[in-house]
Image (cartoon, helix red, strand yellow):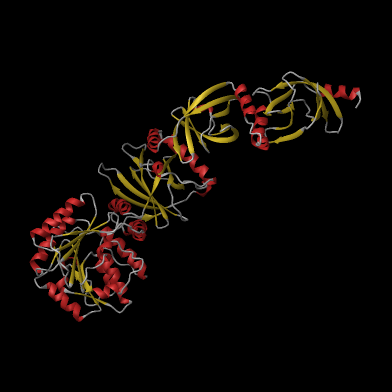
């Protein structure tokens, strides 16, 4: 190349400025130039002669594109003059003399080249394990330093509170993280909480973080010992609602790529919340969220005349563009202060798997309200009780039973209760048992049991044992003591069985009968025998009809339109709908040979009807018997119309009944949208 060509190249350069460098690892540096136009470096020569082993790297991005080179840095110092051999686009080689200068952070291309080194080059030198050289450079060129304290841990995520105002950070902030002596480039989530900044960092505890803030590199020293779960819960509770929502948004997005459920101690802190609306005393409340029978249910209450414009549900860890558009079940009533109140149940189908949290997004009054809430499992008695508490708001509508109550009850029935029933003796006597298993079942109101025990004492022979079943609940020990005292007072022998707290009442019907009993008679508490000698009548009838279930119907609860002379499945369902079934009797061996697979009824009466309907397949009959027409104790007209209604729906679906039966409930004002 001639001297004139070299001069021409120099003239074409805006500046002949320095050859910039940053250290990569021990004995290795990265160099680049900012000559215009850009030429490829093909050789370098210093005082020690020609520098070889030049490796070219290229950065491509819409905002930045540049070549840089890694070379041996032995013998080179800041300010050293080097002969640089360049090659243009036309293939012509020229030479320049440039000063080698250590770049500062504001040098054009420095941040992009350091990012490329950390992401793509340092891994090639992992054998030497030298990340300290570049980390010392980052510390050197940092404009200032700050600190961060570990405040909470959620799974593999560490949350640090920083002494830097939140407006300096982007929501997704690229950083250089030093962890156990190794540098990595990571994109960290930043959350603002009342002006302070919170960083989410995963994959262990970092020592330092370097972050570009408004063109300045800032070194963050992070400290803190592992945080206990209770401290994390306390910290979460102190977060402002917007900060908590933003944090859950971040964790949810991370879980899209790395599926991980939220720990229980975190989801338990995601409570219900109410948001005030523009109208005085009006609000919209997100009351609860449940997963049951392959569906997601969000319970909302709106007080006032404002209508919801839209409802969306987003599962934790779900891809954002797959947000679920739920079906809405809307019920309207009037609240105590005169404002209208609407109950809205948003129901969406699920693909399967356990869900930990859900973000409910409401469009109302032209604004968007977002809130993360815990998704509770709907397969428990307490979940069904929650759904029951909303039923009065729906004017006790059958649509609510079918769309909400039935899925909750079905999930509860399919759940296995591992805890066994607890058995207590009613008296100290050791009775070997009788030919009749006389069973009294107290459901929701155990106080109704007292009158039934008095009725038994007055109408059954002495020596006849009884079996009493209660469901565990708060104060169960005091209730058991009362029952044992009643048995002692009325000289009744037998046993007391206590079902687990989360077992349905129908579980009482499946508890094994006492040997050597040949006849099983079961009665709901709150009813008394119709006359003396009823027990002998039932035993005699069972002996005469060994393939027959005897049904007890409360006289005051039977509709005149129900024909009792022929009990078929439809008639039995009608009796169930009126909560008229109060007792049943059958041979023990008949009950034993009629299995009920996957039972669907959770009330005692429902479980009896379910077995009787199943019995038709085995040639068994069901007939009413006057001796089982137990009379209702004054004040016990406390029908479980919610539970009975659900069981009727479940049984109708199970046996394939398609005809609509009139329910003994108020007219509906529920619409599905």
| Front residue of this view, candidates 125 and 497 | 125
Q: Quadrant of residue 532?
A: bottom left
Q: Quadrant of residue 419?
A: bottom left
Q: Quadrant of the N terminus?
A: top right
Please tell me whether residue 80 is drawn above or below residue 363 in the rendered image.
above
Q: Residue furthest right?
A: 2
So how many labels did they put on this image? Answer: 0
Residue at 22 percent across and 56 percent down: it is 444
Q: Where does residue 381 sit, x and y in percent of width and height?
A: 30, 54
- Image side of residue 456 versus residue 407, left or right: left
| Front residue of 115 and 605 | 115
Q: Position of residue 442 (x, y in %)?
A: 20, 59
In the image, is residue 152 above or below residue 664? above
Image quarter hosting the C terminus: bottom left
In the rendered image, which quarter is residue 32 located in? top right
578 or 364, nearer to the observer = 578
Q: Is residue 633 visible?
A: no
Q: Residue furthest top?
A: 79
- Residue at position x 38%, y 40% in the image: 269
Q: Position of residue 359 (x, y in %)?
A: 44, 44
Taking the image as shown, residue 302 lies to the left or right of residue 191, namely left
User: Is 417 positioned to the left or the right of 562 in the image?
Assistant: right
Res. 59 visible in picture: yes
Left or right, residue 474 beside residue 218: left
Residue 313's x, y, as percent?
A: 45, 48
> Residue at the bottom extreme?
544
């Amino acid at each position: 190349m001639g001297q004139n060509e070299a001069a021409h190249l120099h003239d074409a350069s805006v500046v002949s400025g320095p050859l910039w460098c940053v250290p990569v690892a021990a004995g290795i540096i990265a160099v680049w130039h900012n000559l215009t136009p850009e030429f490829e470096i093909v050789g370098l020569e210093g005082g020690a002669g020609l520098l070889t082993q030049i490796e070219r790297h290229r950065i491509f991005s819409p905002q930045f594109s540049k070549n840089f080179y890694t070379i041996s840095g032995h013998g080179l110092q800041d300010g050293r003059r080097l002969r640089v051999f360049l090659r243009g686009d036309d293939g012509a080689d020229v030479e320049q003399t440039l000063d080698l200068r250590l770049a500062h952070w504001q040098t054009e291309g420095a941040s992009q080249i350091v990012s490329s080194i950390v992401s793509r080059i340092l891994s090639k030198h992992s054998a030497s394990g030298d990340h300290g050289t570049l980390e010392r450079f980052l510390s050197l060129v940092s404009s200032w330093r700050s600190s961060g304290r570990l405040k909470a841990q959620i799974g593999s995520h560490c949350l640090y509170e920083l002494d830097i105002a939140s407006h300096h950070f982007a929501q997704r902030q690229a950083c250089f993280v030093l962890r156990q002596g190794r540098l990595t480039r990571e994109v960290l989530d930043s959350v603002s909480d009342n002006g302070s900044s919170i960083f989410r960092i995963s994959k262990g505890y970092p020592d330092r973080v370097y972050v570009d803030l408004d063109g300045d590199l800032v070194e963050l020293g992070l400290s803190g010992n592992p945080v206990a779960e209770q401290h994390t819960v306390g910290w979460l509770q102190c977060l402002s609602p917007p900060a908590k929502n933003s944090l859950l948004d971040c964790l949810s997005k991370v879980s899209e790529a790395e599926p991980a459920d939220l720990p229980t101690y975190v989801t338990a802190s995601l409570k219900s919340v109410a948001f005030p609306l523009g109208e005085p005393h009006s609000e919209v409340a997100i009351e609860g969220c449940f997963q049951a029978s392959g569906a997601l249910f969000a319970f909302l209450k709106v007080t006032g005349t404002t209508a919801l414009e839209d409802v969306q549900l987003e599962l934790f860890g779900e891809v954002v563009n797959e947000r679920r558009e739920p079906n809405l079940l809307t019920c309207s009533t009037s609240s105590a202060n005169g404002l209208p109140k609407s109950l809205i149940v948003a129901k969406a189908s699920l693909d399967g798997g356990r869900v930990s949290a859900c973000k409910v997004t409401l469009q109302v009054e032209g604004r968007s309200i977002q809130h993360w809430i815990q998704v509770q499992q709907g397969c428990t008695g307490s979940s069904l009780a929650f759904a029951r508490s909303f039923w009065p708001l729906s004017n006790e509508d059958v649509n609510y039973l079918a769309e909400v109550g039935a899925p909750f009850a079905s999930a509860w029935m399919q759940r296995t209760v591992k805890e066994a029933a607890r058995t207590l003796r009613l008296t100290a006597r050791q009775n070997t048992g009788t030919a009749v298993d006389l069973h009294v079942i107290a459901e929701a109101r155990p106080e109704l049991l007292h009158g039934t025990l008095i009725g038994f004492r007055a109408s059954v022979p002495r020596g006849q044992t009884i079996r009493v079943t209660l469901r565990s609940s708060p104060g169960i020990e005091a209730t058991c003591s009362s029952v044992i005292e009643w048995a002692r007072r009325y000289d009744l022998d037998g046993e007391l069985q206590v079902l687990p707290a989360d077992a349905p009442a129908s579980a009482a019907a499946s508890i094994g009968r006492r040997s050597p009993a040949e006849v099983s008679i079961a009665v709901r508490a709150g009813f008394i025998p119709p006359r003396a000698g009823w027990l002998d009548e039932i035993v005699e009838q069972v002996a005469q009809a060994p393939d027959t279930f005897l049904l007890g119907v409360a006289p005051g609860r039977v509709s005149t339109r129900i024909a009792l002379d022929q009990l078929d499945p439809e008639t039995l369902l009608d009796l169930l709908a009126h909560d008229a079934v109060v007792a049943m009797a059958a041979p023990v061996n008949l009950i034993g040979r009629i299995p009920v697979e996957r039972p669907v009824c959770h009330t005692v009466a429902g479980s009896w009807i379910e077995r009787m309907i199943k019995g038709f397949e085995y040639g068994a009959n069901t007939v009413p018997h006057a001796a089982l027409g137990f009379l209702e104790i004054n004040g016990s007209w406390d029908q479980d119309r919610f539970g009975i209604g659900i069981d009727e729906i479940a049984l109708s679906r199970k046996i394939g009944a398609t005809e609509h039966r009139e329910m003994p409930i108020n007219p509906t004002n529920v619409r599905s949208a």
